[in-house]
């Protein structure tokens, strides 16, 4: 004959075990919840740090009076500062600059200001190839029309590498020397012959033949070269390798 007290004890033990299991599960859930909270807090801190770094980089770039930019390997802009947006890109909204290349931006500016009034982007993009193919920093003298005005810029370009050393794009800075060039040219016009010659000789390094930005200076009789300096010739126009 079954003992009723045994059944009652067994039922009580089962309930006790059920409560213990529930308590363990609740404790586990609480542990997971606390872990998630710590993880969320950590992720939030990392995102805040990333935002700070981005804002710091933007602030530094915009403090620099020279042009500054970064492109991917295909020539699409990743980052630009206010100076280049204002002086070269004529104040275009960032959505028309970032993730666009020089040809696309130049085409848009031609549509706005007239095909004959904007020629700068026709040459700048091709000099990226020289830097990417060589992996070496270069100095360029680049000129062209922006809103109908000749712009003269000293440009420094270098490759951008990731932590493993792979080339992932290019970075560059550009110094607008247009006013300095024009002022020195004006001074030369009012100077004695010896001073005028010295100034003109100095300014010669910033010149293209006849200031024609699409003209190859290797031969005067060559037609306009839309692919310069991608032609691969050793004597590339206005190209100067930086000294180490």
Image (spheres, grey):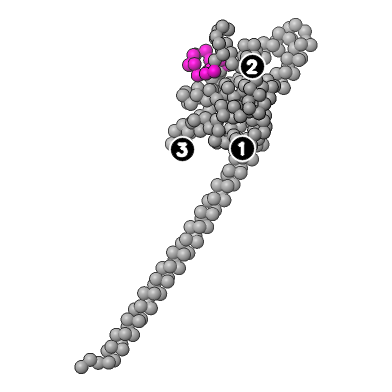
Q: Is residue 33 magenta?
A: no
Query: Nearer the observer, disc 1 or disc 2?
Result: 1
Count of numbered badges drawn on the protein: 3
In the rendered view, would you say 185 is above or below 73?
Answer: above
- Which is nearer the eye, 196 or 105? 105
- Pointer 1 residue: 94
- Residue 228 magenta: yes
Q: Quadrant of residue 115?
A: top right
* Numbered mark located on residue 206 in the image: 2
Tell me residue 119's x, y (percent): 62, 21
Cβ–Cβ below 8 Å for labels 3 and 1? no
Residues at marks 3 and 2 touching, judged by CB atoms closer than 8 Å: no
| Main secondary-structure element of the magenta-colored stretch | loop
Disc 2 residue crowd, few under 14, some 14–19, many 20+, Cα 10 Å: some
* In the foreground, 50 or 243: 50
Where residue 231 appears, as percent x and y from the top left, is 49, 16
Spatial CA span between label 3 and label 2: 36 Å
Residue 64 screen position, x and y as percent:
65, 34
| Left or right of 174, for residue 234 | left
- Of badges 3 and 1, the one in the foreground is 1
Q: What residue is rendered at 49% in x and 30% in y?
A: 74
- Magenta span of residues: 226-238
Task: Point out the tag, 3 or 1, that comes first from the N-terminus.
Answer: 1
Can you tell which of label 3 and label 2 is closer to the viewer?
A: 2
Identify residue for label 3. 163
Mark 3 or mark 2, earlier in chain: 3
Residue depicted at x 64% and y 14%: 211
């Amino acid at each position: 004959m079954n003992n009723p007290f045994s059944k009652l004890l067994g039922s009580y033990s089962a309930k006790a075990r059920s409560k213990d299991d529930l308590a363990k599960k609740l404790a586990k859930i609480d542990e997971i919840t606390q872990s998630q909270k710590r993880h969320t807090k950590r992720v939030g801190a990392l995102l805040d740090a990333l935002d700070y770094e981005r804002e710091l980089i933007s602030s530094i770039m915009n403090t620099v009076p020279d042009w500054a930019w970064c492109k991917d390997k295909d020539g699409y802009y990743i980052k630009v500062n206010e100076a280049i947006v204002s002086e070269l890109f004529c104040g275009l909204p960032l959505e028309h600059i970032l993730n666009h290349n020089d040809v696309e931006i130049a085409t848009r500016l031609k549509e706005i200001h007239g095909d004959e009034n904007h020629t700068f982007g026709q040459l700048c993009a091709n000099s990226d190839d020289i830097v990417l193919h060589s992996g070496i920093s270069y100095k360029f003298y680049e000129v062209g029309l922006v809103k109908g005005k000749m712009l003269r810029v000293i440009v420094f370009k270098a490759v951008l590498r990731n932590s493993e050393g792979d080339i992932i794009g290019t970075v560059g800075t550009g110094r607008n020397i247009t006013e300095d060039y024009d002022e020195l040219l004006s001074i030369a016009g009012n100077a004695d012959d010896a001073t005028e010659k010295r100034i003109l000789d100095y300014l010669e390094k910033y010149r293209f033949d006849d200031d024609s930005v699409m003209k190859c200076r290797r031969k005067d009789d060559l037609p306009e070269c839309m692919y310069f300096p991608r032609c691969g010739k050793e004597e590339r126009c206005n190209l100067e390798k930086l000294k180490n």
